[in-house]
Image: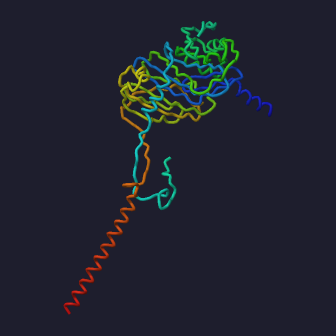
């Protein structure tokens, strides 16, 4: 039993296929790679879909392959890293200050602390059932665009090119083969990190990788997710959708309920990276977050539909004690004023009574 358990544990560490947001990441044999975060921006105009994605990876792999199914012939180019910084700024929460009157536990006289508490090369040989429709070197990526009539043939092609697919991953590709989808197969191998023969000679793949931009014809907005069901750990999806209207998934496909973190119209020209994606035209931007605590429950791809263009933006409030002048709490002034006024009333009442008594004595 102990030997069997050790075998299972070691097997899980040898060249695992790490599913990510819309594809499968496969390292060299005996190496590991993990995707900490995949951020994707999707532009859809009703006819053409563009997906720009950026991976943040970790592990000891110097080379890795990544496979993404696409419904039509795809063009692949490098994306602009600044795009995601721009989208993050556009969709970030609005910060507001909310004042309160009475002191709380962190305020004087309850707390005397001073803090406010805010917190390329020539194509390699392939299998007979796999067609290589294009191959190019894009920065650190060796990109091949493939057709396949058999998932096992696709697995064989990748093996001939230095990568190994598990039987489970080959099985998950079957629905895409039946629908005659094509594939983008990307070899992540920074220049100087490994040779075409697989000899390691450089640093591991770590940190933020250069974004990839994939463009294909599509009359429906679809985001491939099925391969993520192979993930061994909970998955998180962050998605920016730029379209004519607010777009939301038709269902949760086995994850938690998708959360809209931003929805609103933008000019599409906020910077060059965004204008390159929108064509410089106004669009409706929807930001979505979704968690997949049990990836094995993912049962399909995300299909997104247009809904009412209701704007939404998260508001983060900072509560502060209401003050005036040089930070004098209003409650102190109010209480002091009230006490002074009350004292004045008492004095006036007493004087009035004394005056009345004096007048009575005088009359007597």
Q: Position of residue 253 (x, y in %)?
A: 52, 30
* Above-or-below relation of 337 to 43: below
* Above-or-below relation of 162 to 287: above
Furthest-left residue in this view: 363
Closest to the observer, 102 or 42:
102
Q: What residue is at 47 percent from the left and 16 percent from the top?
A: 215
Which quadrant of the figure contains the C terminus? bottom left
Q: Where is residue 252 in the image (x, y as percent from the top left)?
A: 50, 32
Does 362 sit left or right of 246 as displayed?
left
Quarter occupied by residue 291: top right
Furthest-front residue in this view: 326
Say how the picture is coloured.
rainbow
Q: What residue is at 44 percent from the left and 58 percent from the top?
A: 103
Q: Where is residue 201 in the image (x, y as percent from the top left)?
A: 69, 18
* Above-or-below relation of 8 to 194: below
Does 325 sit left or right of 120 as displayed?
left
Q: Position of residue 363 (x, y in %)?
A: 19, 90
Callout count? 0
Which quadrant of the figure contains the N terminus? top right
Closest to the observer, 59 or 144:
59
Quarter occupied by residue 347: bottom left
Closest to the observer, 75 or 71:
75
């Amino acid at each position: 039993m102990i030997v069997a358990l050790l075998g299972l544990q070691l097997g899980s560490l040898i060249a695992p296929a790490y599913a990510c947001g819309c594809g499968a990441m496969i390292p060299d044999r005996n190496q590991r790679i993990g995707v900490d975060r995949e951020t994707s921006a999707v532009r859809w105009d009703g006819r053409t879909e563009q997906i720009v994605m950026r991976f943040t990876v970790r592990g000891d792999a110097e080379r890795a392959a990544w496979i993404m199914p696409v419904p039509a012939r795809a063009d692949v180019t490098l994306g602009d890293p600044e795009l995601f910084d721009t989208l993050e700024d556009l969709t970030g929460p609005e910060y507001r200050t909310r004042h309160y009157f009475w002191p709380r536990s962190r305020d004087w006289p309850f707390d005397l602390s001073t803090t406010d508490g805010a917190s390329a090369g020539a194509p390699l040989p392939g299998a007979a059932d796999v067609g290589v429709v294009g191959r190019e070197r894009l920065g650190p990526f060796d990109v091949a665009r493939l057709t396949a009539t058999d998932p096992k043939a696709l697995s064989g092609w990748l093996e001939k090119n230095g990568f190994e697919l598990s039987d489970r991953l080959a099985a998950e590709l079957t629905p895409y083969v039946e629908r005659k989808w094509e594939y983008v197969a990307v070899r992540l191998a920074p220049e100087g990190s490994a040779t075409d023969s697989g000899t390691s000679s450089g640093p591991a793949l770590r940190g933020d990788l250069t974004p990839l931009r994939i463009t294909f014809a599509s009359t429906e907005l679809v985001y491939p997710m099925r391969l993520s069901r192979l993930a061994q750990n909970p998955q998180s999806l962050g998605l920016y959708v730029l379209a004519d209207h607010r777009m939301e998934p038709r269902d949760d496909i086995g994850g938690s309920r998708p959360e809209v973190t931003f929805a609103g119209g933008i000019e599409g020209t906020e910077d060059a990276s965004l204008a390159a994606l929108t064509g410089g035209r106004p669009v409706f931007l929807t930001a979505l977050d979704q968690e997949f605590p049990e990836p094995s429950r993912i049962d399909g791809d995300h299909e997104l539909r247009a809904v009412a263009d209701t704007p939404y933006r998260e508001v983060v409030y900072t509560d502060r004690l209401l003050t005036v002048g040089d930070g004098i709490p209003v409650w102190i002034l109010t209480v002091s004023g009230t006490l002074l006024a009350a004292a004045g009333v008492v004095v006036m009442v007493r004087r009035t009574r004394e005056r009345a008594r004096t007048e009575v004595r005088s009359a007597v």
